[in-house]
Amino acid sequence: MKKRLVTSVLSIALTFGLAGCSTNTATTNNSSSPAPTAASGAKENAVTLKLAMWDSDSEFLDSWTKKVKEFSTVMPNVKMEVETFKSDGDYLQAMKVRLAANELPDIIELKPGFINDFKAELLPLNDLSVTAKNTKAKQYAVDGKILALPVISFPELVYYHPSVFKELGLSVPTTWEQFVSVLTEIKKSGKYQPYAMGGKDSWPNYPFNEFMPILASGDANYYDKIAGMDKPFDKGTPFYKAYTDIQTLYDAKVMGADPLGLSNDQATGLFEAKKAAVIAAGLWYLPQYKSKVGNIDDLAAFALPTRHSETEPLKVMTFTDNFFGINNKSKNVEAAKKFQEWMFSSDAYSFYVNKKQANSVMEGVKADVPFLNDFYKANKVEEFSFLPGGENFNKYVNAIQLDWKKLGQEMMGGTPLDKIANDLNDKWTKARASK
């Protein structure tokens, strides 16, 4: 009897349970069920835009990351996710890994030389309204397509402490011979390291090893020109002439006892503590110096004097930088376009330019950079634009793994110029023959 009673109770309970489940399923799938609420609809339309960027200035990275997230006030359904790197080298390596895995972020930052590497992945931006107002964008178009928008331009400078020059009775050099001589005189004083070189990181030598051959050529399209030559590193070429000058500088031993043993942070630290007198860098270094020192009272700049006679024009390399492009495989292309429009047309743009203390590249927007104005007043210079090489140049560079900055490290380490030039010529000729 007890068994039968328990079985009956369980049967009744199971019957009601199944009925309840059947009712809930029917209600969920009913075509006349109420529409999602506004909140659930917004959740369905939520977008996460991923942006990747680099900068050696951690303070700028933090402030720009916060500014970028303000885009969510314009498009509330968009969440900005920013990934940052401390150097463009680490950044480039990471992006190439992402590219191979088809995992590039929605918005990627590029140096002008990176555009060709990623051109197949970049969305043309010719149709954006802000593109027409960007004064530098067309110069960097690939096959007529503007694939990324630059944010700033700036001159490459040689920073120095006026108090040190005054103390040692030195004048600002205006030729290469004067430049090496001034650094040599500072070395003789025994009080200051003449030049602060963070050669351990390789990239700080770029004003010399990367830019001087272009300046020596006098041709902004120098890279494309050498792409058509079998031996562009021979004696008598702009490369060889510039590297001969660079070798003179390195042989003068004016960069401390161990320039390859110091990181960039250590080298800039010496300069900021006024233990070193001179350092070359772009205008991007200005806000970093100011944030570390607190003021720019004992800071001035001159153009790297690559000329050998004062009758020649004093050229200053002008660099256009920090390009932003859109991944053409992004699932959020329209949101990424709106971000670009916002970035270049709102107060975000002025915020970026003034934080970087650089020149504006957008019509109607002027940067507030008193230091730069003072530089142009004190130095009669001729601006020279840096342009990256095209497809063929980059093909050969990648084939022989040419890195101008690593060449600088080799030179500082004692590798003879002739060996470097001969090795490059041999590899370059073979690369051209095989492509």
Image (cartoon, helix red, strand yellow):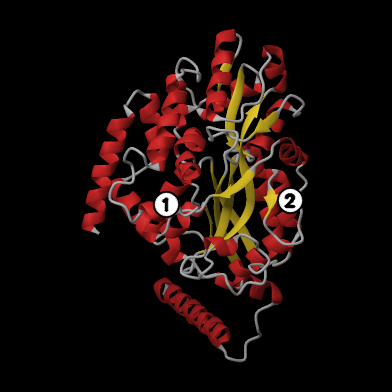
Is the residue 359 above or below the residue 339 in the image? Answer: above
Seen at 41% across and 76% down, the residue is 4
Q: Quadrant of residue 175?
A: top right
Residue 88 at what x, y percent from top left? 49, 44
Q: Residues within 10 Å of mark 1 (few under 14, many from 20)?
A: many
In front of the other: 298 or 100 = 298
Q: Amino acid at mark 2?
A: Phe
Seen at 70% across and 52% down, the residue is 67
Residue assigned mark 2: 351
User: Image check: 170 left or right of 435?
Assistant: right
Outermost residue, bottom direction? 32
Residue 241 at what x, y percent from top left? 41, 36
Residue 250 at what x, y percent from top left? 44, 24
Is the residue 140 above or below the residue 402 in the image? Answer: below
- Kind of element beneath mark 1: helix
Mark 2 → mark 1, Cα distance in angstroms: 33 Å
- Res 389 seen here: yes
Residue 223, disc: 1
Q: How many numbered tags mark residues here?
A: 2
Is the residue 119 above or below the residue 34 in the image? Answer: above
If the image is split into quadrants, where does the N terminus sit?
Answer: bottom left
Residue 104 at what x, y percent from top left? 46, 59
In front of the other: 150 or 345 = 150
Outermost residue, front direction? 311
Is the residue 254 above or below the residue 132 in the image? Answer: above
